[in-house]
Amino acid sequence: MPVPLYATDTEPCIPVRLLDGHQEYLGWRDIIVHAHEIEDLALPLPPAGSAALRVLVAIAARITTLDDTELSTGEWAARRRALLQQPAGFDDHAVHAYFDAHTWDLFAEQRPFLQDPRLTVQCDEPAGVNKLVFGRPEGNNLAWLSPHTDTDPQPVPSDQALWHLLIHHFYGAAGRCRARTVGDKRSASGTAGPLRSTISFHPLGRTLHETLLAGLPHPADDWPEADDHCPWEEPQLPDPAGPLPPVTWPGRLLTGRSRHAALLIPSKDGKQVTEAYLTWATGQAALPAIDPYLIHHVDPEQPVAKRHKPRRADADRALWRDLDALLLVTDETSTVQRPTAFAHLNDLPPALRARLRVRAYGFDQDGKTNNRTWYTSLTPPIWPWTQEHNPATAQRIAECRAAAEEIGALLDTVSQQAWRELTTPGRTTAPKKLPAWSRNTRAQYWPRAETTFRRLLDDPSLAARPAFATDAVTVLRAVTRPAVTRHFRAAQTIATAVARLRRTS
């Protein structure tokens, strides 16, 4: 029987929001062709949105020749500005020529899109469609919030299978997977995807055309002298037992660092995926690379390969707490490096720069297998606040954020100490589990702190630390008020904690 087709470049598989507010499903090719008529991607799974943006940015670099490493910085910036002035968006002929040159079919026999057809031979058994879909229970896990079980696995529509395939390549788990045999090597252990447990920050223009061009990082001068390929451009399937190709710009950096191999098995009509193979893609250690959309913490004492550590995604952390890391210029003394994709946004036309927002995609995970939740956030236009354009505002934002963090950390400390003194007097070690007071004060403090943060920005004459200390005192009193009425020792304990908070302001 003929293999069913699902050409992701033309099939309606990626939801987008048009400028008129309507939502449509488009393929990769049509998204690029109509990018100037699209406001934003509308993928319901934030990590899939983050992955799709990286794929689209790499494609945009190819069709505009902004991937030419021979261009000087000035030439590159001038070309990007010229492309941004094109009312018709990307050149149709260049778009179709690029897509016609590669295979985008999800179920192609020889080179299925972002998959490895050898897995049917190299793997003992498939992993199951429930393993493919994030959120479904699989194996012996209990079905708490989902009706799916491995005894009756339900197919997943092919468009949604593509979304989850993207998530596995970028955010996939580490640890045990389906056994794969390559040559004389047999292994059932994999490593985490390149974006696992991170939060990505993407410049967001008025149209997707602007977003892709604004978010395209400028090529650095120190990339390896090697041909650059995205996975669908590679002349051959990768060798799982061989050395990794060098990380090159922009294809391999943005799309070619997956640690997972997958193969989707379609239904007869190609509209659904009924089975999936998921396993390790390489046994080699990941090559050092700085993703251009992540905030990195820099430790100069560490070896070069471990010097940059991406900021972890945290669903309990509001986006305003990352603002200063996006606005402040990175220099040799900085311990926090803003996303490198932001380094050349000052070359954009002023009208676009003034309206540029930032979309954040976070996937709160541990480093191995547990997924907590994913989320997305959107800033207002923040580029006029950057250190390059308004150093006073940028420093004020950094000052207020730092004060909020310091008072928040102190609130955690005093609430834990007060709880310990009240419940286990004489104990000197902190409890393994965060006490109820600390959990509740933390949950109430940060929303109040965000309101205070905005008030402090509106009135630069206000001192930051006293304002946040007042929030902390108010929250601590509210959380502990029931205990004060029930325990005779609670009032003195809380008074001591409040006094410590006030002294720091």
Image (tube, helix red, strand yellow):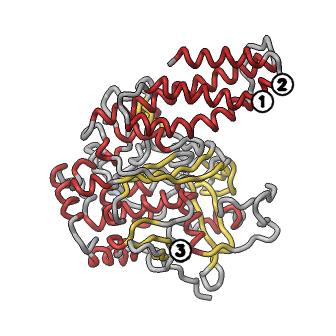
Mark with earlier residue (3, 2): 3
Q: Is residue 433 left or right of residue 238?
A: right
Mark 3 element type: loop
- Of all residues, the one furthest to the bottom in this rendering is 1
Q: Is residue 426 visible?
A: yes
The mark closer to the camera, 3 or 2, is 2
- Of all residues, the one furthest to the front in this rendering is 485
Alpha carbon distance from label 1 to label 2: 7 Å
Mark 2 element type: helix
Q: Nearer the viewer, residue 482 or 229?
A: 482
Alpha carbon distance from label 3 to label 2: 64 Å
* Quadrant (top left, top right, bottom left, bottom right) of the N terminus: bottom right
Q: Is residue 499 left or right of residue 114?
A: right
Residue found 82% across the figure and 68% down from its top:
151
Mark 1 element type: helix
Q: Amino acid at mark 3?
A: Leu
271 above or below 90? below
- Kindly check if marks 1 and 2 are in contact, taking CB atoms under 8 A apart as contact: yes
Q: Amino acid at mark 1?
A: Pro
Residue found 70% across the figure and 19% down from its top:
494
Q: Which residue is mark 3?
A: 106
Residue found 65% across the figure and 59% down from its top:
134
Q: Nearer the viewer, residue 302 or 494?
A: 494
Mark with earlier residue (1, 3): 3
Q: What percent of the width, then of the height, locates residue 330?
A: 32, 34
Q: What percent of the width, then of the height, locates residue 460?
A: 35, 31
Residue found 54% across the figure and 66% down from its top:
115
Q: Amino acid at mark 2?
A: Arg
The image's mark for residue 486 is 2
Q: What percent of the width, then of the height, locates residue 504?
A: 52, 17
Alpha carbon distance from label 1 to label 3: 59 Å
Q: Which residue is mark 1?
A: 482
